[in-house]
Image (cartoon, helix red, strand yellow):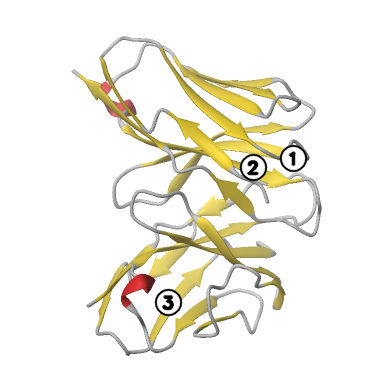
């Protein structure tokens, strides 16, 4: 059974810092990996999607990397801002087309202090 | 265009009551997923529809949970005889194309509190 772990569970940083969020998964037979943002009381907003054949994706100040063989992904946030405060979730989709659902980690709660 | 919508946004039920949660996916999206998110945890898969067919219900925690999507668009998740452990946020997601490259779009969720 796929298990997804996110470290750290919570993080508080001053504004302007660069930071890295970590995600690991136990079954490397994944189709893709997504990073989501969740604000309190809101749904999930997709940030980046990395296909299993890709090594990284970038969007603005965000960069996500994927090392499928070692079962790891990182989300790098450059020059953090208070508006980045949210919970960040990573999720993987299994390669088996019969298993379309995403398996999520428990998230990293990020607080960026002004 | 409009995203995934869910109603109600908040629901309080007394233990033993039945509840029905509604999901309106993005128009034209073939796939629809229901997830359950407990406080402080990531979402966990409940069930999956492709059009009106329920192809995977392996995540439904008990036979008190039932989902339907009769016309391949709107879906309803029904929970019978609610228990306190059913308290969670129920998220609905839809995607355009099943099977290959696709991205799931999530609704805002319904927060269910069972008292």
Circle 1 sits on which residue? A30
- Please tell me whether mark 2 or mark 3 is closer to you in this view: 2
Task: Judge whether B72 appears above or below B103 on screen.
Answer: below
Q: Nearer the viewer, residue B2 or B102?
A: B102
> How far apart, in angstroms, are the residues tagged by discs 1 and 3?
31 Å
Residue at image location 76% in from the left, 26% down from the top: A69
Answer left or right for B44 relative to A17: right
> Which quadrant would residue A19 be assigned to in this image?
top left
> Which quadrant would residue A54 be assigned to in this image?
top right
Q: Residues within 10 Å of mark 3 (few under 14, many from 20)?
A: many
Q: Nearer the viewer, residue A109 or A44?
A: A109
Q: Nearer the viewer, residue B57 or A77?
A: B57
The chain letter under disc 1 is A
Q: Secondary structure at mark 2?
A: strand
Task: Judge whether A45 appears above or below B25 on screen.
Answer: above
Estimate the x, y position of residue B49 in percent, counting from the top left. 67, 70
> How far apart, in angstroms, are the residues tagged by discs 1 and 2?
6 Å
Residue at image location 81% in from the left, 51% down from the top: A96
Q: Given contact means CB atoms under 8 Å apart, are the residues at marks 1 and 2 in contact?
A: yes
Q: Secondary structure at mark 3?
A: strand
Task: Judge whether A48 appears above or below B104 on screen.
Answer: above
Q: Quick one: quadrant of the C terminus of chain A?
A: top left
Circle 2 sits on which residue? A92
Estimate the x, y position of residue A36 in percent, counting from the top left. 49, 39
> How far apart, in angstroms, are the residues tagged by discs 2 and 3?
26 Å
Q: Residues within 10 Å of mark 1 (few under 14, many from 20)?
A: some
Name the N-terminal-most of marks 1 and 2: 1
> Which quadrant would residue A78 be assigned to in this image?
top left
């Amino acid at each position: 059974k796929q298990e997804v772990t996110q470290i750290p569970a919570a993080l508080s940083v001053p504004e302007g810092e660069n930071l890295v969020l970590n995600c690991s998964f136990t079954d490397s037979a994944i189709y893709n990996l997504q990073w989501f943002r969740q604000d309190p009381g809101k749904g999930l907003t997709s940030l980046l999607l990395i296909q299993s054949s890709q090594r990284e994706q970038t969007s603005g100040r965000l960069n996500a990397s994927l090392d499928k063989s070692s079962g790891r992904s990182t989300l790098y946030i450059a020059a953090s801002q208070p508006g980045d405060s949210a919970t960040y979730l990573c999720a993987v989709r299994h390669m088996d087309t019969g298993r379309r659902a995403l398996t999520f980690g428990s998230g990293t709660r990020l607080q960026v202090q002004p | 265009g409009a995203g995934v919508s869910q109603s109600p946004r908040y629901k309080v039920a007394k233990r033993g009551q039945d509840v029905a949660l509604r999901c309106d996916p993005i128009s034209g999206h073939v796939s629809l997923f229901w997830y359950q998110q407990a406080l402080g945890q990531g979402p966990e898969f409940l069930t999956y529809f492709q059009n009106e067919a329920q192809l995977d219900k392996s995540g439904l925690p008990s036979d008190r949970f039932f989902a339907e999507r009769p016309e391949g668009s709107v879906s309803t998740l029904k929970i019978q005889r609610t228990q306190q452990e059913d308290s969670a946020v129920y998220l609905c997601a839809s995607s355009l194309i099943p099977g290959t490259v696709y991205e799931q779009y999530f609704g805002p969720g319904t927060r269910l509190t069972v008292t």
